[in-house]
Image: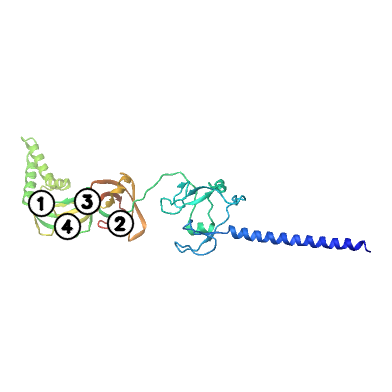
Amino acid sequence: MNLKRPKLVALLALIVLAGGAAIFFVTSRHRSDQHASHEEQLYTCGMHPQVIQDHPGNCPICGMKLNPIRKQPGRTASTSGERKVKYYKSTMMLGEISQTPRKDSMGMDMVPVYEDETADSQTIAIDPVTTQNMGIRTGVVTKGPLRRTIRTVGTVDFDETALADVTTKFKGWIEKLYVDATGKQVHKGEPLFEIYSPDLYSAQTEYLLALNQSPVAAGGEALKTSALTKLKFFDISDEQSADLEKTKVAKKTLHVNAPIDGIVVEKMAVQGQMVDAGMKLYRLADLSLVWVLSQVYEQDLAFLKLGQEAVVRLSYLPDREFRGRVTYIYPTLDEKTRTARVRMEFHNPGFFLKPGMFADV
């Protein structure tokens, strides 16, 4: 009985010592984990990464909420005590480093880079919350042409090569108007008005006299050709000359026809009006093709080339686009606005592009 008591006491003492050691180990490990977690948890600003704090709060620069910094994989604290600085880098200017602490070219303090961080220095890791706050978007790199879009305001104008003025080559009086309003559409060869002219009547009479001469008479054929040419020089159509040759009767009035297909954009002719030779009576414009003139700043002229595609949008047709081409870059520059005029051509089915309109180019 006396021999068993010391063994029992020793066993109890061993159990107590083992329990105390286990409690001490668990408690010290828990404190170590808390200390390490507390030491590793830092906070930074998504817009100003140079701002780092060991407690949550707001950025002192922009006032945004600070985000926790995740511990980067592969980076462990140095166990030898103080970490050794390898160099200093700028947080604003990538690639700007220094061997001594100083301010970067933006005036910001450069941050240290430690030797144990250089192994992962080629990897950039950003917290997802910071990525979202910064609005970062990623995509697959593709190979293709680089495009530069130039936006400006243009004015729709007539195609100057498709304008025609209607005049007479003789003095006369307008007897009847067939096209009596601006904006009417006319076709080539369609009569515009009837006119009486003494010169025109005399030319008809000369042609009839030449027709009545015998073909075998001396100079008869030449006289006929000369009289017919005179009528053509007065812009009398071949149909009217053929009708005159058929009826053998000189008419008091002859009609003047439209020289092109187009729209009447100017009308000066009035019924009963006396007109002189060369007086403008109508102006016709073919609107099937129109010009768009725009102003482009001189720093953008290097990107313009003849034949480039141009897109036009109108305010009253916002869902429709008109596509054309750059046809001319004017050789002069406006000294006040520092812009050059650029001309583009657009096909205009339906006449949606109306001269005088503003357009987004």
> Residues under labels 2 and 1: Cα distance?
51 Å
Where is residue 75 shown, x and y percent of the image?
Answer: 59, 50
Report the mark closest to the observer, 3 or 1.
3
Query: The N terminus lies in which quarter of the figure?
Result: bottom right
Q: Is residue 217 above or below residue 195?
A: above
- N-term mark: 3 or 2: 3
Where is residue 342 shown, x and y percent of the image?
Answer: 27, 49
Report the mark closest to the observer, 2 or 1.
2
- Determine which residue is flagged by label 2: 359
- N-term mark: 4 or 3: 4
> Residues under labels 4 and 3: Cα distance?
37 Å
- Determine which residue is flagged by label 3: 335
> Residues under labels 1 and 4: Cα distance?
26 Å
The amino acid type of the residue labelled 4 equals Lys
Q: How many marks?
A: 4
> Residues under labels 3 and 1: Cα distance?
59 Å
Mark 3 crowd level (few <14, some 14–19, many ≥20, 10 Å Cα): few
- N-term mark: 4 or 2: 4
- Determine which residue is flagged by label 1: 251
- N-term mark: 3 or 1: 1
The amino acid type of the residue labelled 2 equals Ala
- N-term mark: 2 or 1: 1
The amino acid type of the residue labelled 1 equals Lys
Task: Tell whether 75 sits left or right of 225.
Answer: right
